[in-house]
Amino acid sequence: MGFLKTLFGGREESPEEKAEKRREREFDVLKYDGVRARKMGEVKYAIRCFREALALRNDTETASYLAEALLSDKQAEEARSILAKLAEELPDHIGVRLAMARADEMMQDYTRMDEDCRAALQIDNGHAGALYRSAQAKHALHDELNAVALLTQAIVQDGHLTEAYLLRAEILRDMGSLTEAEADIDHLLKDEKAQPASEEAVMLKAALRLQQGDAPTAITYYNKVKTQNPLMGEAYVGLSTAYAANRQLDRALSTLDEAVELMPDFSEGYKERGRIKLMLNDKAGAADDLKKALETSPEAAKALEGQFSNIEQEMNEQYKNRNPYGF
């Protein structure tokens, strides 16, 4: 074979060249195995493939795939470290900065999230996603006025940005601007292009109606969510609260009976049912439901450990502030 290569002008590859080609083949196989695994939801295997590929050769695209896979696997700290290096290599890549902000959010480091969002906006100050992320950071830092301003800018850039309308409505509601908050929700409920059609929007509409004294309409909206998603515990609690506000305590109680039957570990359902039973003067039933609530929520039980000498005192303490609508 060596004679033929010499005869026809060929050159035999050196051992180093052969090894390099082998590494390139292995790199490609690992990289694209990782891509396929990630698409199939096999995140841990994808992470392993990307790590092994990067051990063979540094590659920006593969590093970005690894960072995204790590974020999907809740490994935010390592993901952010990789993304920070990518940001040095790609200083004008807004997607890298937004991924860093996502990692910051997962680690609840909202100050750094705010910084990364500002860096993203320096790249493109009209990017709707960056404006929304920046608003999230401001909201987490309790800077509500700037959060609302950023969300308004995001909506100007993308009038169908569902999450921006939702967050602005939530903030406005917390600020007491109920009419403005409801206007945002009504826009979402009427906007067929806004995707996805959010249960959260319907829930917030119901809560806003209830907060403004319109329990019958709130009941209608809570029932919509409950019908669409029978395992959404929050809808049962909201519906029960609306029934109670409408002086329909029997319906409030039966709603929560249904909830805990479907979801036996639904701590909030037991707690709310106990509140309704207390309103019906069933102290024994209320105490029993509080016990079940604590049994199904070890965190709550641990937090209360040693604070109460008897279940009646505990029950009264738990329920005394659970009537926000004044009924």
Image (cartoon, rainbow, N blue to C red):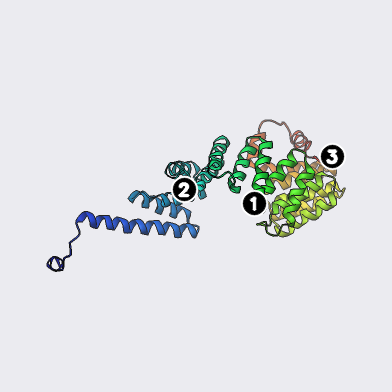
Crowding near the residue tagged with mark 1, few <14, some 14–19, many ≥20 C-alpha atoms within 10 Å: some
98 relative position to 325: left or right: left
x and y, in percent, of residue 83 in the image: 46, 44
17 relative position to 203: left or right: left
Foreground pick, 167 / 309: 167
Are the residues at dot 1 and dot 2 in contact (C-beta closer than 8 Å)? no
Identity, as a three-letter code, of the amino acid under mark 1: Asp
Q: Which residue is mark 3?
A: 326
The mark found on residue 158 in the picture is 1
Judge whether 108 appears above or below 196 on screen.
above
The mark closer to the camera, 1 or 3, is 1
CA distance for labels 3 and 2: 49 Å
The mark found on residue 67 in the picture is 2
Sequence-wise, which precedes: disc 1 or disc 2?
Answer: 2
Q: Quadrant of the C terminus?
A: top right
x and y, in percent, of residue 213 in the image: 85, 45
CA distance for labels 1 and 3: 39 Å
Foreground pick, 253 / 50: 50
Q: Tag 3's secondary structure?
A: loop
Foreground pick, 150 / 100: 150
The mark found on residue 74 in the picture is none
CA distance for labels 1 and 2: 27 Å
Identity, as a three-letter code, of the amino acid under mark 3: Gly
Q: Tag 1's secondary structure?
A: loop
x and y, in percent, of residue 287 in the image: 76, 41
- The residue sitting at the right extreme is 247
